[in-house]
Amino acid sequence: MADKSTFLEVDQQEEILFVKINRPEKRNAISDELIMALEAVFSAIPAGVRCAVLHGEGPHFSAGLDLSELQERTVVEGLHHSRMWHRALDRIQFGTVPVVAVLTGACVGGGLEIAAACHIRVAEQTTFYALPEGQRGIFVGGGASVRLPKLIGMARMSDMMFTGRVIQAEEGVAMGFSQYLAAEGEGLTQGLELAKRIAQNAEMTNYALMHVLPRIADSAQSEGLLLESLMAAIAQSSPEAKQRLADFLEGRAKKIV
Ligand code: 1HE
């Protein structure tokens, strides 16, 4: 598959699409070109792909926004820039396949915003999280104020921005940044294992988890419950669900344990 940017590598291996941020000399800082390339890749996931793994080349997942591109922007230009990030990260969160992020080293600022748009995060022991926007005199602009409070709570996010607090990988699991902790050098293997498992799910289930669950979480209770019922009825009537239920009842399916 053709690369969408000098700094983004895409590699399809059967049902899994590996997307690698490849700009280690700048600690995988995200330029406008890179954010647009991410948007392009996640807007056109090739047929046959069932799950993606997003990772970074070198010791750091991403040092966030490419600060060298932060020129004097007018208010309106600033709005457009932030909305460009929102569009790209929405394509990751609300695209066609679940995305597993494999984190290493710096996962900071815009890098953390990208990680938060993924569906599952595996953090190697070297990972650390920070929101240096607070210290740089700016504000988050890539969706962190919406996505991070859902992962770690608003008080923790405010603390990170007020005080410049850096969270290490292990604490990050307890706080909700990542769901898995991997030994150094093992993150990609673990991420791939998870991606292969996710790829086995009924497509309707993955769709519901990606597109419906977050909408339910954003809804008032009565609308949320109605959405849940609609989704449940659609999912259970799919031929794939009927086959899977029959497989279980007739002893062909794997048990939970
Ligand atoms: C960069 C960037 C960057 C490194 N933009 N060029 N993000 C930050 O405020 C984090 C800034 N970066 C760092 O704190 C450190 O670079 C790290 C802790 C991530 C890594 O440290 P280290 O010692 O391994 O690398 P380094 O020597 O600091 O950086 C190597 C090179 O990458 C160097 O360039 P060089 O030409 O001198 O070799 C750095 O300038 C460059 N580099 N990080 C541009 N971020 C949607 S809004 C989101 C808002 C934000 O993300 S704000 C947070 C920005």
Image: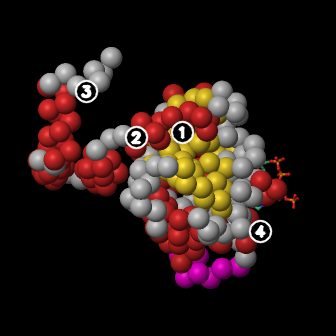
Q: Is mark 1 within 8 Å of ligand 1?
A: no
Assign the C terminus to one quadrant of the image.
top left
User: Residue 41: x percent and y percent?
Assistant: 53, 65
Toward which corner of the image does residue 187 lie, by quadrant? top right
Q: Secondary structure at mark 1?
A: helix
Q: Quadrant of ligand 1?
A: bottom right
Three-letter amino acid code at the position of disc 2 = Ile
Find disc 3 in the rendering and name its residue: 253
> Which mark is on residue 126?
none
User: Residue tagged by mark 1?
Assistant: 192
Marks 1 and 4 in Cβ contact (< 8 Å): no
Label 2 environment density (alpha carbons within 10 Å; few <14, some 14–19, many ≥20): many
Which numbered disc, 1 or 3, marks the residue closer to the eye? 3
Asked whether mark 4 lies closer than 8 Å to ligand 1, one says yes
Q: Mark 2 — residue?
A: 198
SS assignment at label 3: loop
Q: CA distance from mark 1 to mark 3?
A: 23 Å
Residue 2 in the image, given as x and y percentages of width and height? 62, 68
Q: Amino acid at mark 1?
A: Leu
Looking at the magenta stretch, what is its main secondary structure?
helix
Mark sitting earlier along the chain (1/3):
1
User: Type of residue at label 3?
Assistant: Ala
Task: Say whether residue 78 is magenta.
Answer: yes
The answer for how far apart the CA atoms under marks 3 and 2 are is 16 Å
What residue is at 55 percent from the left and 54 percent from the top? 12
What residue span does the magenta drawing correspond to? 72-79
Q: Considering the numbered disc 2 on the image, is that residue within a helix, a strand or a loop?
A: helix
Dot 4 and dot 2 residues touching (CB under 8 Å): no
Lower position in the chain sequence, tag 1 or tag 4: 4
- Amino acid type at circle 4 is Ser
Name the one closer to the observer, 44 or 138: 44
